[in-house]
Image (cartoon, helix red, strand yellow):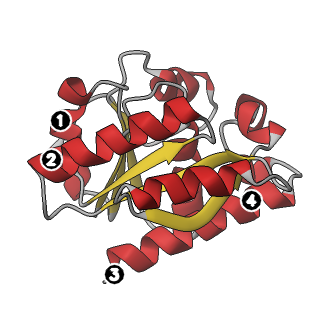
Amino acid sequence: MVITLMNQKGGSGKTTLSIALYFAFLRSDVSTLLIDTDPQQSIIMLSSQLNEPLNVVNKIDPLQMGKNTLTIIDTPPDYVEAKKSIEAGDIVLMPFKPSQFDVFSTIETANTINKDYPKKPVYAVLNCNVSNTSYPIETIDTLKDNGVSVLSSKIGNRLDFARTYQFDGNIYKSKNSKAKSDIDALAMELYGKMIK
């Protein structure tokens, strides 16, 4: 099974969520491969700094993918560059932040993927959710009104996601139980989509 994280909007949280989901599935004893296709190579760089490197490669490698139950692909914010990663994905996950720029980009990304791959499941997930305000819900409603499937899981605007380097990239080494719960809920929801 392959989950591709893609949004044409840079800074939407693709890399952060790729790493967090990697550790979430590892905790469930799912052998997981990360593929870092973003030219910034943030996941590769993180892995090179760790005592226990991540199971990560920098290109789509069917041999490596076949050795693992799950593959998570982090992509650049460029549709053309990400196309092979989208093709390889069984599910495309589009993180978005509660901003008009992210909403517009997410709608465009979803429409383009749906046009090119009409049978591929594509889901948006709210990242950096600001609780106790109505605006994040308005952005979700806008996406849904434009035909974008939005997961019920929401990733909160939690400082520990921004400083995962302090935790060897592993949000589960953080003391922030809400951050861990957010990722657990997302992983469970994605798992439910994958086994359908």
Q: Residues within 10 Å of mark 3 (few under 14, many from 20)?
A: few
| Secondary element at tag 1 | helix
Could you tell which of marks 2 and 4 lies nearer the N-terminus? 2
Q: CA distance from mark 4 to mark 3?
A: 23 Å
Q: Nearer the viewer, mark 4 or mark 1?
A: 1
Question: What residue type is disc 4 on?
Answer: Lys
Rendered residue at 32%/65% (across/down): 69
Q: Residue 83, which numbered label?
A: 1
- The numbered dot on residue 195 is 3
| Mark 3 touches mark 1? (CB < 8 Å) | no
Residue 43's x, y, as percent? 49, 29
> Marks 4 and 1, Cα distance to the nearest angstrom?
31 Å
CA distance separating discs 2 and 1: 6 Å
Check disc 3 and give the amino acid type. Answer: Ile
How far from the left and from the top, in percent, is residue 38? 37, 24
* Residue matched to label 4: 180
Q: Amino acid at mark 2?
A: Glu
